[in-house]
Image: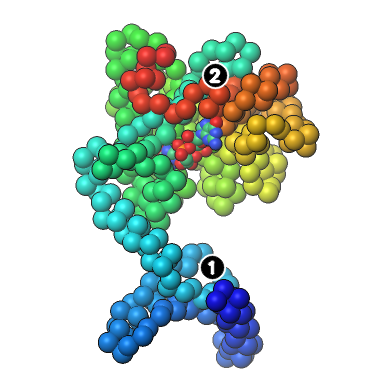
Amino acid sequence: RYEQLDELRQDILKLNEKFNRLERVKYPGNSFVIISGVAPISTIEELNSAIDNANLARKSVKNSLKAACIIFDEELKMTLLKEAEITNDMEQALKNKEFVVYYQPKYKINTNQLVGAEALVRWRRNGNLISPVEFIPIFEKNGFIVNVDFYVYEEVCKMLHNRLKKRLPVIPISINVSRVHLNDEDFVNRFETLVDSYKIPHEYLELELTETVLLDNTLVAIDIMQQFRKKGFSVSIDDFGSGYSSLNLLKDINTDILKIDKEFFSQGEMKREEKIIVSSIINMAKQLNMKVVSEGVKTKKQFEFLRSIGCDMAQGYLFSMPIPVTEFEAMI
Ligand code: C2E
Ligand code: CA
Ligand code: CA
């Protein structure tokens, strides 16, 4: 029963406190966390698999500094199975070119002009198109995101390269930068080498870093953003306004573009408070010489409001969903 499970967790928290009081004497300056995994067992023959399951449950705890007790239930079992399947298939999928890049257009608000697009990855797997929210968190955990991201970056470079070669019009494309790249000192160079190998002028690429990545690794992120800007790439803060100390970020970070989080536009009708916040963000960004893109714009009313307060660009279902490359190229 859930109430009983909750009680059990509380007991473990208490036990952890007790343990810490005791052990602090022996190991001054250290603290301890009890992380436990629990699995059901009905006969002694199941002992080994129950121990494995309990261990799997224990290892599923992420970034916890608090005592935790995880039960191996059906839900966890399914999640772990799905994760294992994705992990098993990912390398072959990359070789088979099952990852595909979709593009979502961005429009300049006061002229309705197509001025850019964001590259968004999908996984075409057994006839289904899987959303990145299903696999990116797993790839960020196991590191494979580095390969997928560079695959996406290269596909974008190829598209731009072909258009430039044929003297077709091009617009800047933004790509997403996973938090994992921040641990790689060579990331900026590796990115530049790729872009230069396709002879793409740097102004055609924009790098999006999410606000949470910036908050978690502020100093490294600031440094990386500076390096990219010095090389002539644009950088933007993605999901701006979704965190708790968004405003604090702005005093330390030089960025070209702010992307206002789609949560502000998730209801067709914006609340008075949301409108005030969005207007203030835009005002502030202007004074700091940043451009603003509103993301997830869904209704004509939101668009009119954004126009009235001087937002520069918009991206969202009102204009277009993310679309395959051929469809996108036909629009430019
Ligand atoms: P994001 O960077 O915030 O991307 C915007 C997401 O909003 C996209 O979801 C897009 O399809 C969705 N969206 C666009 N317009 C609307 C709208 O009007 N309403 C709503 N509700 N949603 C809208 P998507 O493609 O599922 O991507 C989800 C997230 O996965 C992205 O969020 C990004 O963080 C990550 N992601 C996607 N592609 C890549 C990639 O190539 N590399 C990395 N590292 N992350 C990626
Ligand atoms: Ca993004
Ligand atoms: Ca976003």
The residue singled out by tag 2 in the image is 107
Residue 157, given in percent of the width and then of the height, sits at: 34, 26
| Callout 1: SS | loop
**Amino acid type of the residue tagged 1 in the rendering:** Ser
Name the residue that disc number 1 marks.
64
| Disc 1 to disc 2, C-alpha distance | 42 Å
| Above or below, comparing residue 32 to residue 155 in the picture | below
Seen from the viewer's position, the closer of residues 230 and 96 is: 96
Label 1 or label 2, whichever lies nearer to me, is 2
The quarter of the rendered structure image containing the N terminus is bottom right
Neighbourhood count class around disc 1 (C-alpha, 10 Å): few under 14, some 14–19, many 20 upward: few
Where does residue 225 sit, x and y in percent of width and height? 52, 37
- Residue beneath the point at 63% across and 44% down: 242
The colour scheme used to paint the residues is rainbow
Is residue 320 visible in the rendered image? The answer is yes
Q: Please tell me whether residue 270 is drawn above or below residue 219 in the rendered image.
A: above
- 310 to 56, vertically: above or below: above
Q: Secondary structure at mark 2?
A: strand
| Beta carbon at label 1 within 8 Å of ligand 1 | no
Residue drawn where x is 62% and y is 25% of the image: 299
Q: Is residue 127 above or below residue 31?
A: above
Q: Is residue 84 left or right of residue 319?
A: left
Whole-percent x, y for residue 196 in the image:
33, 26
Type of the residue with mark 2: Tyr
Residue located at (42% from left, 14% from top): 331
Res 257 seen here = no
State how many labels appear. 2
Q: Quadrant of residue 41?
A: bottom left
* Labels 1 and 2: the sequence-earlier one: 1
